[in-house]
Amino acid sequence: MKILFIHQNFPGQYKHLAPLLASKGHQCVSLTLRVKEPITWKGVKVLPYALPDRGGQKVHPWLLDLDSKVTRGQACFLAARKLRDNGFVPDLILAHPGWGEAMFLHDVWPGARIGLYCELYHRSGFPHLAFDPEFETGDAELQPLRIRMKNINNHLHFPAASAGISPTRFQADTFPPEFRDRITVCHDGIDTDAARPNPSVRLQIGDLDVTRDDEVITFVNRNLEPYRGYHVFMRALPRLLKERPNATVLIVGGDEVSYGAQPPKGKTWKQIFIDEVRGRIPAKDWQRVHFLGRIPYSQFVQLLQVSRVHVYLTYPFVLSWSLMEAMSCGAAIVASGTEPVREVIRDGESGRLVDFFDQEGLVGRVCELLEDEEQRRALGQAARRLMIDEYDLHKTCLPGQLTWVDSVMRSAPPGPPRD
């Protein structure tokens, strides 16, 4: 079978599935912006496509998102047409539609089945919108209209798709019924052999040197920003450091924005909230706070293994791999009780939950766990069992993804492109 993967940052969510399909003898090809020259990666032929140079143009702000997606869709169409003209005709296209790349591929290969990675449908009601009023700007009645425009991309992709796959029920359930009925829930998978407890772990980064004997509190974002509760954690930090004079706080994350609003021009969310709380933290306590930036995966796992309490906060949004990897490492978790988190954590069973905005409650839960070794052990063991039983990469998730691929190929052939 010939399979084409479409992902702006390939392999992305296909980092395990694509090599597995290639190892089974399928001819796997990817189109991506991530490379500049063709390469072969784990049996997958990875081909670049390029975006055209475009001068500045005036469009309505709500159309900027769609404009960028159409630009990617057209560029990917041109690269796909070249592949077709060179004789490549895929039986199956597996695409992440989030950047618009697969928008016109049904026009290139009308006979190919298309399976979409359904990450999120943007809902215009609370709590998906206006969850955190602090960062809401502009006319509140206009915001649902703006959000509705963001979903044009989903509506352009789904008529040509045979089926979809989504990593969590929360994410799948954001899609309207006509989409949701064709979406299978199957997580990307957690490598529970790589992310596992290690009582003898030692994390050394620069002057930092900690083991399981140290009282380590960890907080991880891809980028330090409000969508992942960075502001809530930072505002809780002065009291947390005061209550736990021997704790070391390790914060992982970049300075950019992955989701949500941009910070004021020339500033970063990271520095904005450092500046907000720094005056309330004595110098000797601030020395116990370590901003590690982005670290290699091997050190990231060590950080989770050394963590005595791991804090995870998020808006009602896509669930982070980092939370589930922390659970796989047997960490004791204190997390926001938002809907996606409740899918994997039950309060008092596999972690402790607090209201997203409750800084006092957050500090209280963290301190409670730091004082209770038996509770930490029980929560961490239960969290790891859940990851092994329901989210293990090799035993559960990859087999589930292969079953989904088979079901896509058994689906009825797609019709001609619709006008």
Image (cartoon, helix red, strand yellow):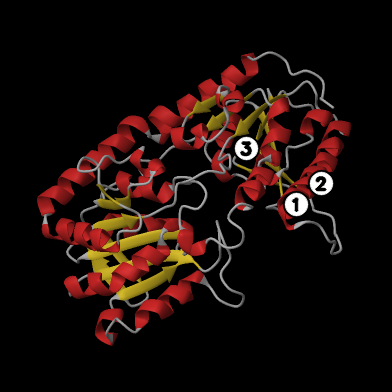
Of tags 3 and 1, the one toward the viewer is: 1
Q: Residues within 10 Å of mark 2 (few under 14, many from 20)?
A: some
Instruction: State how far apart marks 1 and 2 are (Cα).
Output: 18 Å
* Mark in front: 2 vs 3: 2
Question: For numbered disc 1, what is the local secondary structure?
Answer: helix
Answer with mark 1 or mark 2, whichever residue precedes in sequence: 1
- Hey, which residue is sitting farthest right in the picture? 85
Q: Using the rendered view, name the quadrant where residue 299 is placed.
A: bottom left
Look at label 3 and name its amino acid: Gly
Q: Earlier in the sequence, mark 3 or mark 1?
A: 3
Marking on residue 63: 1
Q: Nearer the viewer, residue 44 or 126?
A: 126
Q: In the rendered structure, which amino acid carries the disc numbered 2?
A: Ala
Residue toward you, 185 or 317: 317
Which residue is painted at 86% across and 63% down in the image? 55
Q: Which residue is mark 2?
A: 75
Front-most of 370 and 355?
355
Q: Residue at coordinates 65% horizontally, 43% vertically from top-left? A: 148
Tell me if I can see residue 192 in this picture. yes
Q: Percent position (x, y) of residue 141?
A: 60, 52
The image quadrant that residue 350 belongs to is: top left
Q: Which of the pair 374/198 is nearer the observer?
A: 374
At 46% from the left and 25% from the top, the residue drawn is 399
